[in-house]
Structures are given as C-alpha cells and as structure tokens.
C-alpha cells in the first residue's frame, strides 16, 4: 500500500483496491504532474481531492 504524506503532517493510505486509486507511486506522481491533483478514495472518508501543492511525499 502507498502512503501519501501531506505537508500538514497527515498521512493517508492509497489502497489500489478502493475506488479508482492508482496502483503505483509513479502513476500517482504522473497524474499529479499532468492534472495538478489526485482524487484519493479512502475507506473512512470517501473521496479526498488532493492538490500537488499539499503533498509532501509519496512512499
């Protein structure tokens, strides 16, 4: 599972089994580069729209 760390310290999990989450760190980075955002689906909060500016790291 991929972890997305936001600049505010919050950590979100990218589970490829949920919604339309992408499969790899590289796919997420490419999506952010092209669109400037990533729509992450989480099991507890549903969809969260993340902008490239609020993401610190993807591991």
Image (cartoon, helix red, strand yellow):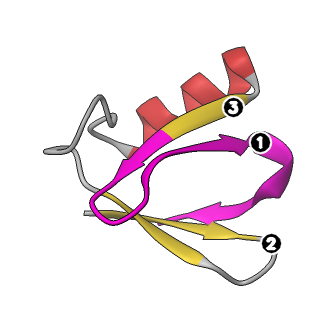
Q: Measured from the top left, where is residue 24 in percent x and y? A: 33, 42
| Mark 3 / mark 2, whichever is N-terminal | 2
Badge 3 crowding class, 10 Å Cα cut-off, few under 14, some 14 to 19, many 20 or more, is some
Residue linked to disc 1: 52
Is the residue under label 2 in contact with that under label 3 (CB below 8 Å)?
no
Q: Secondary structure at mark 1?
A: helix
Residue 37, above or below 24? above
SS state under label 2: loop
Marks 1/3 in contact by CB < 8 Å: the verdict is yes
Report the residue that reaches farthest toward the front.
45
Residue denoted by label 3: 37
Near-viewer residue (41 or 25): 41
Which of the two labelled residues, at mark 1 and mark 3, occupies the earlier sequence position? 3
Q: Residue at x 20, y 44 (%)?
A: 18
Task: Please identify the quadrant where the N terminus is shown.
Answer: bottom left
| Label located before the other in sequence (1 or 2) | 2
Q: Is residue 49 above or below residue 5?
A: above
* Most distant residue in the bottom direction: 9
Residue at image x 33%, y 66%?
Answer: 44
Distance from disc 1 to disc 3, alpha carbons, whole Å, reads 5 Å
Looking at the image, is 11 positioned above or below residue 55?
A: below
The range drawn in magenta is 40-59
Residue on which disc 2 sits: 7
Residue 47 magenta-drawn?
yes
| Quadrant of the rendered image containing residue 38 | top right
Q: Is residue 24 left or right of residue 1?
A: right
| Label 2 environment density (alpha carbons within 10 Å; few <14, some 14–19, many ≥20) | few
């Amino acid at each position: 599972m991929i972890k997305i760390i936001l600049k505010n310290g919050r950590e979100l999990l990218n589970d490829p089994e949920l919604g339309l989450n992408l499969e790899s760190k590289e796919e997420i980075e490419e999506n952010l580069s092209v669109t400037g955002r990533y729509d992450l689906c989480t099991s507890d909060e549903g969809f969260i729209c993340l902008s490239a500016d609020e993401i610190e790291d993807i591991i």
